[in-house]
Image (cartoon, rainbow, N blue to C red):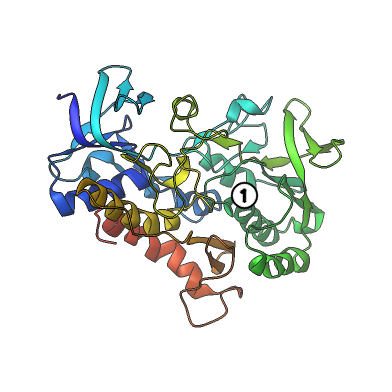
Amino acid sequence: MQSHYEILIIGGGTAGLTVASQVAARIGGGAIAVIEPSTTHYYQPLWTLVGGGIFPKEESVRDEADFIPEGVTWIQEAATSIDPEHRTVRTAESGPITYDFLVVAAGIQLGWNRIPGLADSVGKPGTGVVSNYSYETVSSTWEAIRTFRGGTAIFTEPMTPVKCGGAPQKIMYLAEEAFRTNGVRERSRVVFMNAKPTLFVSPYYIPAIEKVIATRGMEAQLGEELIALRPDVREAVFRNAKTGAEQVLHYDMIHVTPPMSAPDFIKASPVANADGWVEVDKGTLQHVRYPNVFSLGDCSNLPTSKTGAAIRKQAPVLVSNLLSVRAGAAPVAQYDGYTSCPVVTGRGKLIMAEFTYDKKPLESFPFDQRRERFSMYAAKAYMLPLIYWHGMLRGRI
């Protein structure tokens, strides 16, 4: 394997492969390498529907090798450090790899160990602790929902940014619907414990979501962060963000969205800002201090929701600007912060939220997308996966 590439991409997930495919289509793959240790690629937006019992988790998996663009070198290792001053990335096995241009698309890190009691209990039979946020644990969510016989079902969201910001509450709506179908809803308490101060990031969609919660008898407590689990007695400890007061809730099942952050090697790198995210200009996606470094997706500091839909809009902007800089010109393409969050509210029901940096709606369809619609659900469940596998990752969309 050679030790220098003109364009080096860290990450073979949604963002990395989309960029690699688009760049390869423009200049050929020979100058490009992707650093990615995993042999499998996951379509993670499907995991909400897997956890809701709608799809098997195997539907979300493909071989990574099938999506490496022709001519692009796949370095099947994990990046361990970035030295932008010397234009070097290190891996554990191969050591230093140098580059002319770097794209950081390393995704997000799940902090299972940041909540005492979580890592040892999540997904384990008999604990009632489940999560859709990993391939290994997602099946436990539906098992817990399917076998729920009443009691308290809690759904959490941390204070940190998370991938697919609506996912922590989407699984609650699917679970509550299943409880009704299974005849246990009347003896069940369904609670959304959200550490953030608002129910949803875009205010435009909050009244519609509040209506879903109210009409179906669910609860939402804001500013309440999960800080510990006591799986042996099925208790969850929450701390109020404003007062610091703690409350302990008993649970019969609890779906936990773990705290998240940029990967450790990024947090320790000069490319990171004070919060650990890759620090890029929010319009051009070019690094604010290192002009030959670009970033997009979950590991970046872009102030928008971390979704695949956001990456779909970020990637062509990044590619255009990278190739402009490569040609000696200034970056001129601009990303407006567009993101989309399909809020599944039940089987066949979905609120399609779309908005930009200013959190105001930027909707794609000529109707009020705050209404629950089957058409939007069908797009989420059946159309978007096809667009992902055959469009985005191939550089076509």
* Residue annotated with mark 1: 168
Q: Position of residue 346 (x, y in %)?
A: 60, 64
Question: What residue is at 83 percent from the left and 42 percent from the top?
Answer: 242
Residue at point 79% right, 37% down? 238
Residue furthest to the bottom in view is 366
The answer to whether residue 61 is visible is no
Q: Residues within 10 Å of mark 1 (few under 14, many from 20)?
A: many
Which is nearer the eye, 273 or 149? 273
Residue 118 location (% of width, % of height): 65, 29
Residue at 52 percent across and 42 percent down: it is: 139
What is the quadrant of residue 140 in the picture? Answer: top right
Label 1 sits on what residue type?
Pro
Q: Can you tell which quarter of the image residue 92 is in?
A: top left
* Residue 4 shows in this picture: yes
* Secondary structure category for the residue under label 1: helix
Q: Which sits in the foreground, 322 or 369?
A: 322
Q: Position of residue 250 (x, y in %)?
A: 81, 38
For residue 281, above or below residue 263: below
Locate the N terminus by quadrant.
top left
* Residue 267 shown left or right of residue 160 in the figure: left
* Image coordinates for residue 323, horizontal then vertical, percent: 23, 50
Residue 256 quadrant: top right
- On screen, residue 244 versus residue 93, left or right, reads right
Left/right of residue 135 with respect to residue 77 in the rendered view = right
Q: How many numbered badges does the structure rendering display?
A: 1
